[in-house]
Structures are given as structure tokens and as C-alpha cells.
Amino acid sequence: MSENRFEQQPFLETTFAENPESRCPVVLVLDTSGSMAGEPIRQLNAGLRTFRDELFSDSLAAKRVEVSIVTFGPVSVECEFTGIEHFVAPTLRTTGDTPMGEAIEKSLEILRNRKAAYKANGISYYRPWVFLITDGSPTDSVANAAKLLRAGEQQKSFMFFAVGVEGADFEQLRSVSVREPLKLRGLQFNKLFQWLSASLSTVSRSRPTDTPALSNPAAPGGWAVAG
């Protein structure tokens, strides 16, 4: 175990002791490569603030939903797993290329570590979400990431969702996701994050073993269309 993990353990134990609620973890895997510059990154940042505010207004979801943010362009863990009560939406900036494969692998790594912390502290948890948003084509190999995602989905270790902004490589997204990728309508990031927060609120009000019905984001008036 690294020194960092030794340092984190007492903090985690205190966090879980103060709030023993079941956890609903979500990893946001966000493309911050150069092609997202301008209005796309502004709308993405606004959407993150909406996501935080709407979940914070739901007292139960605020205790149960935990979010981590992994950005790529280059890969960076912008936010370790944090409860919505303490989550501050970051202001993301764009730079670099699109190492999507590495970003997915990093997100699965930190998710494994968080689930291990739940188990070590006797905290039950819902099936995690891994939610990818990108507007480009990966500049690295996604072969291993695809293998890990398919194995994890088969084992029901998490649910992976892929959203493509205009310009995204949907062929590559289909190669990694067992679910059909969704295409964002224009730059409707705000609607996307409203749907995501509402979905996680619904999940957090269920039992960890349940699979609650969620609204279809590609329905008429929704934020998405089939890729």
C-alpha cells in the first residue's frame, strides 16, 4: 500500500463513520482535449455546476452519490471520489490530444479502489456508473479499455455510458461500449447533466439491488439522439 493510501485510510474511516449511507458512485470521464475549446468547454463547465446543484438539493442523494472526475487531454484525476455534500464543480480547461483508452483505464482503477474502501468499511453501494463524454477520436489504443469494460459489464461491476459531442468517432465509441453510444443534441450539456442528476437521484432512492427505470434521454425533447 502506498503512503498516500495510508494517509487516506483514517480520513475514509471518519467519512464513512459520519455518513454510513449506501453509496452511489459515478465517474465522469470528460474529454478536455483542444477540440473542446470555446463554447463546448464553457457549456460542459456550466453543466457540471448544474449537476452539483441539483443533486445537492436532494438531501438523500447528497448523502449517497459520490462523484469522481477523470479528464483526458492529458489524463488527470481532477476530483477523487467526493460526496455531493462536499463536491465543488471544477472549472475545466482544454489542452492536448485525446487519450481515451488511458482515461477509461484510469477511471476503472480509481473505481476499483473506491469499491475496496466501501467493502473495508462495511458500506453497501449501488452498481457504479462510468460516464464518458467526448467530441473526438482516441489518439491512443482503446483495445485494453474495451476488454476491461466488457468484462466489467458482464460481471455487473459497473455500467458504462458513452456520449459523443458533434465530431465524436462513434465507430470507436461502439468498439468500447456494450450500450449504443448517444449523441448530444447540439451543446445541450445542461439538459444532459439534469438527466444524469435526476437519474442518480432515482437510483439513490432505491435499494442497491434494484434496477430502477430511468427516463429515455433520446425520447422526443431529450438531450440525445442515437449515435
Image (cartoon, rainbow, N blue to C red):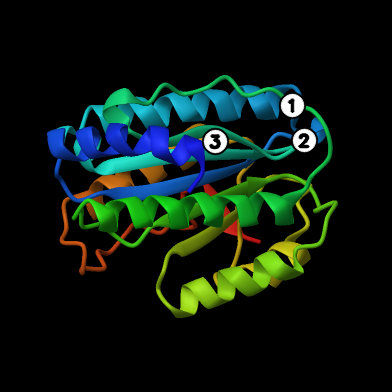
Q: CA distance from mark 1 to mark 2?
A: 5 Å
State if disc 2 and disc 1 touch (CB < 8 Å): yes
Q: Which mark is residue 189?
A: 3
Q: From the viewer's perspective, is residue 102 above or below residue 148?
A: above
Q: Residues within 10 Å of mark 3 (few under 14, many from 20)?
A: many
Q: Which mark is residue 94?
A: 1
Residue annotated with mark 2: 33
Kind of residue sitting beneath label 1: Thr
In which quadrant will I find the C terminus?
bottom right
Label 3 secondary element: helix
Kind of residue sitting beneath label 3: Phe
Q: Residues within 10 Å of mark 2 (few under 14, many from 20)?
A: many
Q: Nearer the viewer, mark 3 or mark 1?
A: 1
Q: From the viewer's perspective, is residue 100 above or below residue 176?
A: above
Label 1 secondary element: loop
Foreground: 101 or 94? Answer: 101
**Residue found 50% across the figure and 72% down from its top:** 152
Q: Nearer the viewer, mark 2 or mark 3?
A: 2
**Residue found 31% across the figure and 24% down from its top:** 86
Horizontal placement of 97 versus 125: left or right?
Answer: right
Q: Which mark is residue 176?
A: none
**Residue found 72% across the figure and 57% down from its top:** 101
Kind of residue sitting beneath label 2: Ser
